[in-house]
Structures are given as structure tokens and as C-alpha cells.
Image (spheres, grey):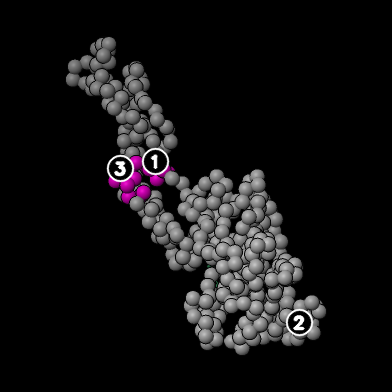
Amino acid sequence: MRLVVPPRWTLRQGTLSLHWLHRFFQLTPYIGEGAKLGRLRYQAHSWKAALVACPLMLASCRLSEIMDSEDVWLSLKPSEPLPSQCCGSGCKPCIYDIYQKELEKWEEAKAKKDRSLLNRKKQQSSNSELTPETFTAFIISSVNQLTEDSYQYTFELPGNSSLGLSLGQHIVLRGLVNGLEVQRAYTPITPVNTEGYFEVLIKCYETGRMSQYVKTWKEGDKVFWRGPFGGFPYTANQYGELFMLASGTGLAPMLPIIQYITGNEDDETFVTLVGCFKTFENIYMKSLLQEQARFWNIRTFYVLSQERSLENLPWSFQGNTHIGRINENMIRSMMDTCRKQPFVLICGSVTFSEDMERHLKAIGLGEESYFVF
Ligand SMILES: Cc1cc2nc3c(=O)[nH]c(=O)nc-3n(C[C@H](O)[C@H](O)[C@H](O)COP(=O)(O)OP(=O)(O)OC[C@H]3O[C@@H](n4cnc5c(N)ncnc54)[C@H](O)[C@@H]3O)c2cc1C
């Protein structure tokens, strides 16, 4: 029997009409979307092509069925962050706000069966501007080990741009640790108007999650930050004297404030910095602190909890260093020598901050007289 294929691609009576097959393919805009075959608009131009297309069409239908299955959508669902992933700094949006947004986006994409909606706004930007919602990549230009476990990292800023932080603001770092995203807060130590780079001082803890990631950093690495958050609202001459209680890396927000004051000759605010460290070796940024202490309105004290004697210290540090843990009496005697009514700034671990608040209250200072970073 001879097979006759008429112009409209119709098979002989009683068999499948290629005309309708052709129409079907025209109505099937995506073939093998999941298999990344792209937007192949298939048209049956020949009898042979139709025979090849048949299994393809079935595979395509099967594939889009699989791609829209509950299991595939569940695998694309954002995971709720664990408390250990959060930086705990109260930043806005925090990791949970971002998760909520991602979840809403996923729900919309699922309802519309449109995976492209999931990529609508990426959480990562190649634009060098810092934003609170989106992580931006910055390149490490130098790594400087300060103590056994602390490092000063310098990050490049394009051209002569500045990070755009105001005093006391921090930024949030993203790290991937054992397959889990972790976010932590860090406070740049560079003066707020620094152009072309910014620096952070990071102490790495033996069992710290982010610390594991930070320890791997080397020059040239790309690191992701978002921000800025927080901050200490300050205007020149707003306070007579700033009395800074800083422990360890709690020194970080104090450094830009001191340099902001010394960099503005109209600002006559006195500053007393009390830096608490374990040993003399653990004092960060000694030369910068010594240099700042040469300004007429800046003075520094050190409290070293694990040094045994002042005699072991360089002569230039002996006069302004106390051995032991900082306590109420020490704070009171240092405050007694303040030249103007002090406003207190506190930064350190949670325990340190709580201890300092307790001491200040015992001395008679109310909550309006201090600020905790
Ligand atoms: C607003 C803000 C600004 C900050 N700025 C800086 C900064 O400029 N430089 C800096 O180094 N850190 C800064 N921190 C602390 C930093 O965000 C991390 O908490 C720190 O790096 C530890 O993170 P991790 O993931 O390595 O440790 P985690 O996994 O969170 O903690 C694991 C363990 O590490 C130890 N550990 C962690 N943090 C401390 C601590 N503070 N004191 C004692 N033991 C601790 C504990 O043993 C803890 O159980 C800042 C925190 C806040 C909230």
C-alpha cells in the first residue's frame, strides 16, 4: 500500500494527523527546558522530523512534569537560618528578614510555576557600593597579623571611593562554614572619610564559626560584606569629654571616633580611652594609639589583666597602665581626673559591657550618660 502525504501533512485515513502534531508543537513553546535545551520552538517540517519529535515531545512533557513536581520545588525552597548563623548585632534587614523575602519570592514562583522569578533579585552584587540588603564583593589587599589570634585586613575600594560609613557603624560579613552560611558583624577601624580602602580588625576564636573562615583569608581573596548598620550619632563638641571603655576588639569603633575628633581642629572634645587587654602584647594598634595620645585633648589608659608587673613594660606605657581587671574603683579614679563632664562609650564582649554598665550605675551614672556598642 502506498503512503500518500498530502500538503497539510495528513496521514492516510484512520491514522495520526501530522497536521495536528505540527499544531501541537507550535503550542509547546519550551522543549526540554529543564535539560537546558533552551527555547527550541519545534515545528514538524517533515515526516521524519515528526517521528524524531514524538519521543522528544513525550520526554519534554515528562521533564516539565518532573521540574514542576513538589520535590523539585521543595529542593529550591530557602532554608530558615539557624540562630548560630545570625550575627546578633540587630542589623536591619537581618538574616531572618532576608530569608522571609526569599521565602515569599519562592512561594510566588511556585504558585506561578515560574522558576525564573527566583533569580529576580540576586543577593550578591558586583557593584562596589555597600548596601544593607545585598552582599558586595571586596578584594583583600593585605593581611597583617597583629597578635597570636588577631589580624588587620585591608580591603580595596575602587578608585578613590569611600565606604560611606558614619561613626561607630559596623558591616556584616558572609562566610560559608562547613556548607552553612554564617553572618557576623565587624566594625571598620579606618577613619570614616578614608578613600580607596578600608580596614577591619578581627580576632579569631579557636571554636568560632566565622573565625574558621577568616583564618583562611589571604591577599587577593574576594570577601562579601553588606551594611552599614548601627552607629553612634555624634556631632563635634556635643559632649565635653568622651570616656571610652573598650575591651579587646571593642577598640574598633573607638578608633574612627578618636581620629574624627583629632582630624577636626574645631572639635574641642576631650577623650579618655581606657583599653582593656590581657597583656601588653595584646594591645592592638599601639603606634596609632600613641600617636593619637600626642593630641592635646586625647589621653589613653591601659588595663592589663594578665601582666604581672609594670616594670616589664616600656617606660612610655608605665605611667598610664594598670595591672589587673578593670573595676569600679579604677573607673571612678580615672573619671575623677576627667576635665569635663564625661559621656561614656562601651564596647567589648557581652560580659564586659554588662560589667561596665553595672560599675557605671554603682558610680551614679544613669543610662543617659553612656552608650553601648
Ligand atoms: C556590632 C558588632 C561589632 C563587632 N565588631 C567586631 C570587630 O570589629 N572585630 C572582631 O573581631 N569582632 C567583632 N565583633 C564580634 C564578631 O561579630 C563575632 O562575634 C566574632 O568574630 C566571633 O564570631 P565566630 O563566628 O568566629 O564565633 P562564634 O561561632 O559565634 O562563637 C563560638 C565561640 O567563640 C568564642 N567567642 C566568640 N565571640 C567571643 C567573644 N566576643 N568573646 C569571647 N569569646 C568569644 C566563644 O568561645 C564562643 O563560644 C562584633 C560584634 C558586634 C555585635
Of labels 2 and 1, the one closer to you: 2
Q: Secondary structure at mark 3?
A: helix
Quick check: 319 left or right of 129? right
Q: Which mark is residue 330?
A: none
Residue, far left: 14
Q: In which quarter of the view is residue 208 placed? A: bottom right
Q: Find out if the beta carbon at label 1 lies less than 8 Å from the nearest ligand 1 atom.
A: no
Q: Which residue is mark 2?
A: 319
Q: Looking at the image, is 104 positioned above or below residue 27? A: below
Pinpoint residue 233: horizontal percent, then vertical percent. Answer: 53, 64
Specify the segment rendered in magenta: 105-120
Quick check: 290 left or right of 255? right
The type of residue carrying mark 3 is Lys
Q: Looking at the image, is 251 positioned above or below residue 325? A: above
The type of residue carrying mark 2 is Gly
Q: Which residue is mark 1?
A: 116
Q: Secondary structure at mark 1?
A: helix
Q: Nearer the viewer, residue 62 or 14?
A: 62
Q: Looking at the image, can residue 215 be seen?
A: no
Pinpoint residue 301: horizontal percent, then vertical percent. Answer: 69, 78
The type of residue carrying mark 1 is Ser
Name the residue rendered at 39%, 50% in the picture.
Answer: 76
Q: Secondary structure at mark 2?
A: loop
Pinpoint residue 370: horizontal percent, then vertical percent. Answer: 53, 75
Count neighbours of disc 2 (C-alpha within 10 A) and say few if under 14, some if 14 to 19, many if 20 or more: few
Q: CA distance from mark 1 to mark 3?
A: 10 Å
Of labels 2 and 3, the one closer to you: 2
Question: Which badge, 2 or 1, comes first in the chain's sequence?
Answer: 1
Q: Which residue is mark 3?
A: 112
Name the residue rendered at 34%, 35% in the picture.
Answer: 59
Q: CA distance from mark 2 to mark 3?
A: 71 Å
